[in-house]
Amino acid sequence: MKPALFIVSLLLFLACSKDESTSADLKANSSRWASNQLVNYTFTQRLNCFCIRGGEKMTVIVQNNQIVDVKDTNGVSLPADLQKSYKTIDELFQLIQTTDPKSVAVIKVTYDDVLGYPKSIYIDKSEQMADEEIGYDSENISH
């Protein structure tokens, strides 16, 4: 009986620690990103999903914190309906903040050590479903 109680207590502690760690990382990195005051920037983003153009690196152009264009590696702008799938850095932070770790099977986030933006986000809503996973890889921010 005592070993089972210990295991349950340990699992509850680890679950709480993970949520607190994720929240602390989010807060620290979003503050670091905000301190740079970047509202006009360009970066590379890969949308990882079972979707049109999923897995391809795109150049995302942001002005006044709004995406104004998304271009493929040949410099060709994507159609407007496909551009809606890409996110600004602030929108990536919002995605992380609004995703409850208890309501998804997996959420993994890594942050850039210098600017604090989310370099990689992976969300698997359900281990029981196929092809509903989504991920964003972001890099090469320039302003």
Image (cartoon, rainbow, N blue to C red):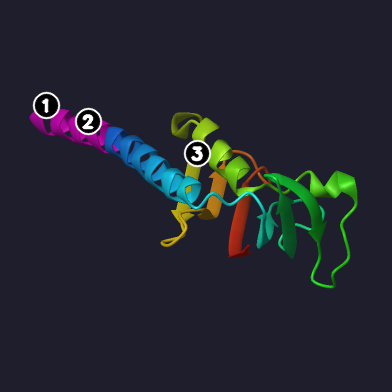
> Would you say 105 lies left or right of 87 here?
left
Whether residue 126 is visible here, answered yes or no, is no
Marks 2 and 1 sit apart, C-alpha to C-alpha, by 11 Å
| Prevailing secondary structure of the magenta residues | helix
Task: Identify the amino acid type marked 2.
Answer: Val
Q: Nearer the viewer, residue 95 or 19?
A: 95
Marks 3 and 1 sit apart, C-alpha to C-alpha, by 29 Å
Task: Identify the amino acid type marked 1.
Answer: Met
> Would you say 64 lies left or right of 114 here?
right
Marks 2 and 3 sit apart, C-alpha to C-alpha, by 19 Å
The C terminus lies in quadrant: bottom right
Nearer the observer: mark 3 or 1; the answer is 3
Q: Which residue is mark 3?
A: 105
Is the residue marked by circle 2 packed among few (<14), some (14-19), or many (20+) residues within 10 Å?
Answer: few
Mark identifier at residue 1: 1
Pointer 2 or 3: first along the chain: 2
Residue 21: give x, y in percent of width and height: 32, 42
Secondary structure state at the residue bearing disc 3: loop
Does 120 sit above or below residue 7?
Answer: below
Taking the spot 54% from the left edge, 42% from the top edge, the residue there is 93
Mark identifier at residue 8: 2
Q: Number of labelled discs?
A: 3
Taking the spot 88% from the left edge, 47% from the top edge, the residue there is 80
Residue 72: give x, y in percent of width and height: 81, 65
Pointer 3 or 1: first along the chain: 1
Secondary structure state at the residue bearing disc 2: helix
Are the two marked residues, 3 and 1, in contact with CB atoms closer than 8 angstroms? no
Residue 104: give x, y in percent of width and height: 52, 35
Which contiguous range is marked in magenta? Answer: 1-14
Task: Identify the amino acid type marked 3.
Answer: Ala
